Each structure stands twice: as C-alpha cells, then as structure tokens.
Image (cartoon, helix red, strand yellow):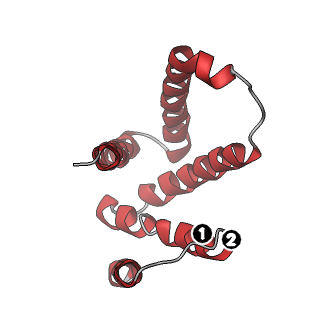
Amino acid sequence: MERWFGIALIVVLLWGLGSFFGKLALIKDIPYRVYLFEGIGTLIVLISFVLFKKVEIFTNFSFNIYASLMGICWGLGTIFFIIALHSSKLSVIVPITAIYPAITVLLSLLFLQERLELKEIIGIVFAMLSIVFLAK
C-alpha cells in the first residue's frame, strides 16, 4: 500500500468520527455552540501543529491567500454542515455533503486544465446519482 493511501484512510476515519461526534453533540446542544466547541478543538490542533512544526512554518514565511480562503470556506461550510445536521439524519446529510469533491473536480478541470479518465468520469456520475437517491 502506498503511503498516501494509508494517510487518506486516516482522513476518512477522522472525518467520519468527526461527523458522528458532531451529531452526538447536537443531541445535547444548539448548532452554534457545537460550532464553538468544534472551533476550540480545531484551535487545539492548530496550536499543537504550530508548536511542533514552527521552524518549517516560519522559515521564509509569506502570506498565502489561497490557504486563507481555504480556511474561510471550510469554516463556513462547517457552520452550514452543523446547521443541516441539526435538522436531518446523519446518514443522509453526510453522503449528500460528501459530493463536494465534484465541485473541486469541476474547478480543477476549468482552471487547472486537469483531465479525467473514463473511470473517473463514471465514478463522479455515480456519486451524483447517489445524491438524487438520498434527496428523495
């Protein structure tokens, strides 16, 4: 197994656990307070990361607007995810919101001139069809 694949599986596990814990949190609390505590958890990870990687981070430091926009988009998306999760089933919201890579693929095709293989196109079509089935 290649290293990147193992790391990707860790991402899937952590994001799956995160969504599950988010739904548990919403059973006991309001969406906005859940996001507050999610943000605190994110800050703990950020501070730990900066402490362990400060030399690499701050050597030849320069501002990265795209990374900042990424954080804003993920943060706002998380707020809306929590609000949606509050009023629906976890088993429906998570697969529907998991289609976001299709937006990323479209943007990469338009702006980065990436190309898709037939199997990748078929996979994206199936993913989009799953949204239709889940939304009904």
SS at badge 1? helix
Mark 2 touches mark 1? (CB < 8 Å): yes
Between 100 and 107, the residue placed more toward the observer is 107
Residue 108 to residue 120: above or below: above
Residue 76, disc: none
Disc 2 packing (10 Å; few <14; some 14–19; many ≥20): few
Point 41% across, 82% down: residue: 121
Residue 108, disc: 1
Residue lying at the far left of the rendered structure = 1
- What residue is disc 2 on? 111
x and y percentages locating residue 24 in the rendered image: 32, 43
Point 52% across, 77% down: residue: 115
Q: In which quarter of the image is the C terminus?
A: bottom left
**Quadrant housing residue 60:** top right
Point 74% across, 40% down: residue: 64
**Quadrant housing residue 96:** bottom left
Between 14 and 1, the residue placed more toward the observer is 1
